[in-house]
Image (cartoon, rainbow, N blue to C red):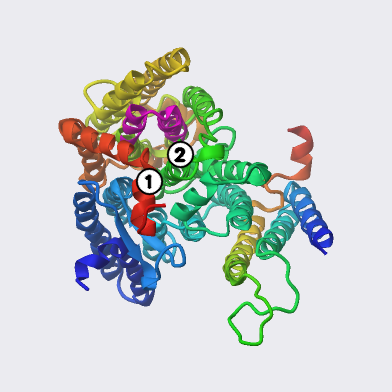
């Protein structure tokens, strides 16, 4: 299970970094989203993996899972959700203002000459 | 509970409330919005002064949110360092706002809301004693700064804004990875508690803690614009509006503050196996930043770009002082911090007036028309340049002198002395060249052969001469005010450098901070 989660986080991060390094704004936004998924999962797992135990005090509980990372990850999800919305709007605005979706606002033929 | 007990949280809550109120007032007249925003910013100054007075005798005020005791609840901590930065921010904000209410706040919507939220994030980041809370306040100040940076729009601004937003989002992700790792290893996020737990790191976890610590450093270095992560800064600062660029002069200092706070408290001398984690990195990188920043200053093609590279170079000097790590060096850095903030802000504001006075030549370094009001502009430029280049009698000289003196017994002494002195000379040459190009090598606007050759039309030439806007006193007064603050740093250099030394001493004895927050001897 640990191996699987670690693998998922690693793949998500690698994909995110690869996409974030692309030249068009859309893959960059997708890459940032994948990276934020990876980090949310990572934060969540930092409370250690536990199955079928509650995070809040209960008489019937055999053990507890750490509630703090769950609170942290909620905050992180809200923030990354807002940031993703913002960066999508900004990418659309850049597409409208610069006339293309290159992150440097250049045309492809200009790229080749540069 | 006395209302004075709530003093530490007021600098955080006041801009938040002002921001929300301003959001409700957006249908009211501009004068009302400007009034509310200005009053809220002005109110931060007496608050910050009260906090500086409280902290100056070494008290560390700890404010427990919701009365939850640390390390379970979130705490705000006011010590000398936090109060010092709050005061710097409050003074800077008022002058930036005074310029903004002259018209640049009408270029887009919600300027004042974003401005107050930016102050909310800045003050919160300086006060918080919790690492995850620091992340949240970073996000708040960044989100507000994205809005401010893009305020008014335009091609160049959108392009610079996109780069700024994307690189900061990557930075936020790294911050969360670092925070998550530290939590996974220690089970706490309270900075004082982390300091205790990290000092007792078992050898098995040492590599994890070290990588988390250095990851945090990368994030803070990105915010502070340290080499090699400074490339976003010149474009972002050069393309935004002048009051925003002036306010952003404090943004890089948030990164510097976080480096100082985290690496004296959590990775300081007392931190056992992870002690002095940054020693091999900070000072050399700061020296390289100073060098490359100053080369950027020399190579700049516009005055705004030059001002932006001067910010990079000043961050180099500041972090060099923090990187040397001795009490004297940190004190020199703390004295230099408000100086470099105010001087850079003054230069950004002045650049705006200069480029308006030059019409279509704006702030490009080419021989342009004679400026209306060139004497006042030139005089202010001269004073600002003297301050930034670190010449006597202004505070830049004192700051650099204290830094050089503190470096005397450091192993890096030859490097520090040669680089600081050579970059000082370079900044003097670059600023003297810009000044003489802008103010001396001019031609009368009425026979401007270059302008007519470029446009080739009679009507354009008339328009060109008319578009030279003489600087108004209301635009220059904040510049003068900021330069007076720089002069004030010299006039009260004695008490202020004493305060800076006391701050450095307090930072290098993190035990007091830990006891104040955790309420017991660890």
Choose top left, top right, bottom left or bottom right for residue B423. top left
Query: How far across and how far down the image is residue B256, in percent?
Result: 44, 41
Q: Chain of mark 2?
A: B
B176 w.r.t. A71: above or below: above
Q: Are marks 1 and 2 in contact (CB under 8 Å)?
A: yes
Q: Chain of mark 1?
A: B
Q: Which mark is residue B270?
A: 2
- Would residue B458 be visible to someone looking at this image? no
Q: Which mark is residue B511?
A: 1
Q: Please name whichever residue, A32 or A40, is drawn nearer the observer in this view of the structure.
A: A40
Q: How far is disc 1 from disc 2 in space, using C-alphas?
A: 9 Å
Query: How far across and how far down the image is residue B323, in percent?
Result: 46, 30
Q: Please name whichever residue, A31 or A103, is drawn nearer the observer in this view of the structure.
A: A31
B470 w.r.t. B185: above or below: above
Classified by dominant secondary structure, the portion drawn in magenta counts as: helix
Query: How far across and how far down the image is residue B186, in percent?
Result: 58, 55
Q: The magenta stretch spans which residues?
A: B307-334
Q: Please name whichever residue, B367 or B75, is drawn nearer the observer in this view of the structure.
A: B75
Both labels 1 and 2 in a single chain: yes
**Circle 2 — which element?**
loop
Choose top left, top right, bottom left or bottom right for residue B187. bottom right
Residue beneath the point at 37% across and 53% down: B521
Classed neighbour count for the residue bearing mark 2: other residues with Cα under 10 Å, few (<14), some (14–19), many (≥20): many
The answer to whether B197 appears left or right of B363 in the picture is right
Query: How far across and how far down the image is residue B200, in percent?
Result: 54, 46
Considering only order in the chain, which callout, 2 or 1, is on the residue closer to the N terminus? 2
């Amino acid at each position: 299970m640990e191996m699987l989660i670690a693998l998922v986080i690693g793949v998500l991060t690698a994909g995110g970094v690869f996409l974030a390094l692309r030249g068009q704004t859309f893959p960059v936004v997708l890459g940032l989203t994948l990276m934020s998924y990876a980090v949310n999962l990572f934060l969540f797992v930092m409370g250690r993996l536990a199955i079928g135990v509650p995070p809040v005090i209960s008489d019937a509980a055999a053990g507890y899972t750490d509630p703090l990372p769950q609170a942290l990850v909620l905050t992180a999800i809200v923030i990354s959700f807002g940031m993703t919305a913002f960066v999508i709007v900004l990418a659309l605005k850049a597409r409208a203002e610069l006339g293309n979706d290159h992150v440097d606002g250049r045309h492809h033929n200009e790229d080749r000459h540069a | 509970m006395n209302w004075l007990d709530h003093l530490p949280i007021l600098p955080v809550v006041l801009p938040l409330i002002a921001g929300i109120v301003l959001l409700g007032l957006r249908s009211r007249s501009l004068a009302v919005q400007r009034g509310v925003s200005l009053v809220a910013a002005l109110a931060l100054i007496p608050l910050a002064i009260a906090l500086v007075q409280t902290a100056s005798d070494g008290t560390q005020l700890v404010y427990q949110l919701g009365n939850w005791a640390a390390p379970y609840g979130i705490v705000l901590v006011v010590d000398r360092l936090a109060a010092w930065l709050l005061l710097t921010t409050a003074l800077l904000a008022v002058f930036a706002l005074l310029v903004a209410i002259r018209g640049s706040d009408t270029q887009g919507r919600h300027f004042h809301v974003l401005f107050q939220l930016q102050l909310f994030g800045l003050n919160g980041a300086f006060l918080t004693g919790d690492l995850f809370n620091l992340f949240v306040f970073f996000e708040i100040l960044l989100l507000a700064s994205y809005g401010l940076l893009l305020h008014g729009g335009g091609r160049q601004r959108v392009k610079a804004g996109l780069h700024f937003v994307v690189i900061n989002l990557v930075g936020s992700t790294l911050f969360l990875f670092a925070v998550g790792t530290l939590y996974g290893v220690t089970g706490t996020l309270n900075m004082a508690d982390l300091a205790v737990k990290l000092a007792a790191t078992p050898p098995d976890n040492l590599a994890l803690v070290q990588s988390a610590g250095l990851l945090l450093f990368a994030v803070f270095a990105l915010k502070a614009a340290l080499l090699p992560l400074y490339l976003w800064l010149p474009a972002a600062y050069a393309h935004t509006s002048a009051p925003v660029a002036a306010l952003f002069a404090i943004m890089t200092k948030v990164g510097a503050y976080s480096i100082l706070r985290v690496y004296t408290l959590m990775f300081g001398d007392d931190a056992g196996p992870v002690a002095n984690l940054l020693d091999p990195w900070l000072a050399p990188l700061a020296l390289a930043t100073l060098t490359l920043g100053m080369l950027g200053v020399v190579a700049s093609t516009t005055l705004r770009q030059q001002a932006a590279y001067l910010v990079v170079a000043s961050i180099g000097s500041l972090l060099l002082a923090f990187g040397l790590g001795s009490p004297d060096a940190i004190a020199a850095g703390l004295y230099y911090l408000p100086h470099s903030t105010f001087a850079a802000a003054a230069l950004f504001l002045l650049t705006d007036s200069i480029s308006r006075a030059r019409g279509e030549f704006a702030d490009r370094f080419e021989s342009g028309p004679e400026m209306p009001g060139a004497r006042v502009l030139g005089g202010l430029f001269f004073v600002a340049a003297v301050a930034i280049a670190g010449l006597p009698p202004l505070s830049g000289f004192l700051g650099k002198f204290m830094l050089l003196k503190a470096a005397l017994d450091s192993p890096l002494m030859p490097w520090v002395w040669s680089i600081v002195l050579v970059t000082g000379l370079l900044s003097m040459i670059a600023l003297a060249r810009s000044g003489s190009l802008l103010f001396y090598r001019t031609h009368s606007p009425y026979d401007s052969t270059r302008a007519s050759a470029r446009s080739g039309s009679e009507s354009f030439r008339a328009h060109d001469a008319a578009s030279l806007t003489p600087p108004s006193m209301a635009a220059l007064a904040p510049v003068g005010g900021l330069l007076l603050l720089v002069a004030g740093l010299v006039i009260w250099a004695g008490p202020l450098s004493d305060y800076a030394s006391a701050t450095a001493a307090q930072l290098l004895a993190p035990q007091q901070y830990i006891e104040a927050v955790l309420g017991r001897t660890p």
